[in-house]
Image (tube, rainbow, N blue to C red):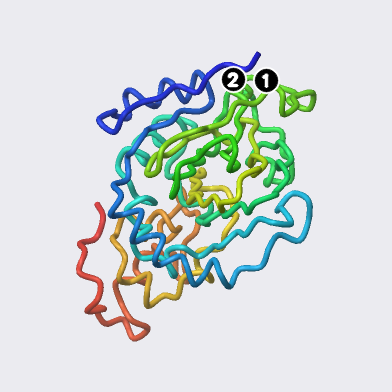
Amino acid sequence: MAGQIPRFDSSATADDVAPALREHGAAIVERLAPDELCDRVERELEPHIAATPAGGDEFTGANTRRTGALLARTPSAVDMIAHPLVLETADKVLWEKKTTFQLHLTQAITIGPGAEPQYLHRDQWCFDFFPFPDDMQVEVSTIWALCDFTEANGATRVVPGSHLDGDPRALTHADTVAAEMPRGSVVLYTGRTVHGGGANTSDQWRTGVNVDYVLGWLRQEENQYLSVPIEIVRQLPERVQRLMGYEMGAYALGYIDDVRNPMHLLRFDSDGHKDAASSFAPRR
């Protein structure tokens, strides 16, 4: 029988959540986003979700829409993407030898009525199935509930403890538990944790905001540089700019032209003049 997903309320700290995530592979923080924030994100997402086609294969889902580029399309999503509790937890759980970590992807996942359960997988398989060491956490994923997540409407299904299993291929949906949670909650899980979208047997659409974080020296699943126009990037908080990849991933990794930090591109225009939109101080 599958174990349960540890749960916390919105007063939890990273010191509470990170150990549970490391031990169980998943954790839920309930009602971390207020209704007002969920309302704004929903309104901003609505036209983009309506224009997003359904998935083209069994994995992406014939009745599931995956709407990306949230930093360009959904300004209010920044409060989820850069939530201090999530970032601090990711920092504690990701491989301790890292120099930086960055955004891996941002997308709204909308599962429609009649959708079949998704193929169980590990998110880190996107790295061409590279066999990272079992004790090396390279990715932390999150899904924020924009509606109540229930077993009936396709709540994400997770296999607690599966991040410790070297070979998860024998796992089935019978081994999973539904990450049921009220609106505004977030489920966190590692890149090694086996999971998948649930079947939607209800008559309602289920929408969640999926934001993943990955080591700074791995390629991002969503290309932030092309997904978000530079004019929008310059208006974002510095912490988000750095998360997007406008920061050196490690020493001499990710520089531009004459070995400059890419943050320089956001501070100055092409002629080397200070960009008026960039008011933050250089990082020391």
The crowding category of the residue bearing disc 2, from other C-alpha atoms within 10 Å (few below 14, some 14 to 19, many at least 20), is many
Residue identified by numbered label 2: 161
Q: How many marks?
A: 2
Q: Give coordinates of residue 234: x percent, y percent.
A: 33, 71
Residue 29: quarter of image: top left
Please give the name of the residue rendered at 39% of the width and 30% of the height, measured from the top-left corner.
92
9 lies left or right of 132: left
Image height of 191 relative to 82, above or below: above
Residue 189, above or below 216: above
User: Which SS class for mark 2?
Assistant: loop
Percent coordinates x, y for residue 176 in the rendering: 65, 26
Quickly name the residue at label 1: 165
Residue 124: quarter of image: top right
Q: Which labelled disc corresponds to residue 130?
A: none
Q: Residue flagged by tag 2: what amino acid is it?
A: Gly
Residue nearer the viewer, 48 or 278: 48
Q: How dense is the environment of label 1, judged by Cα within 10 Å: few (below 14), some, or many (20 and up)?
A: few
Q: Position of residue 182 (x, y in %)?
A: 41, 38
Q: Measuring 31% from the left and 24% from the top, which residue is drawn there?
A: 15
Q: Is residue 247 above or below residue 13?
A: below
Between residues 221 and 100, which one lies in front from this camera angle? 221
Relative side of 55 to 35, left or right:
right
Q: Quadrant of the N terminus?
A: top right
> Which residue is outermost to the top?
1
What x and y, as percent, mark residue 166? 71, 22
Q: Residue at x 47, y 35 (%)?
A: 188
Q: CA distance from mark 1 to mark 2?
A: 7 Å
The answer to whether mark 1 and mark 2 are in CB contact below 8 A is: yes
Q: Left or right: 11 with respect to 171?
A: left
Q: Secondary structure beneath disc 1?
A: loop
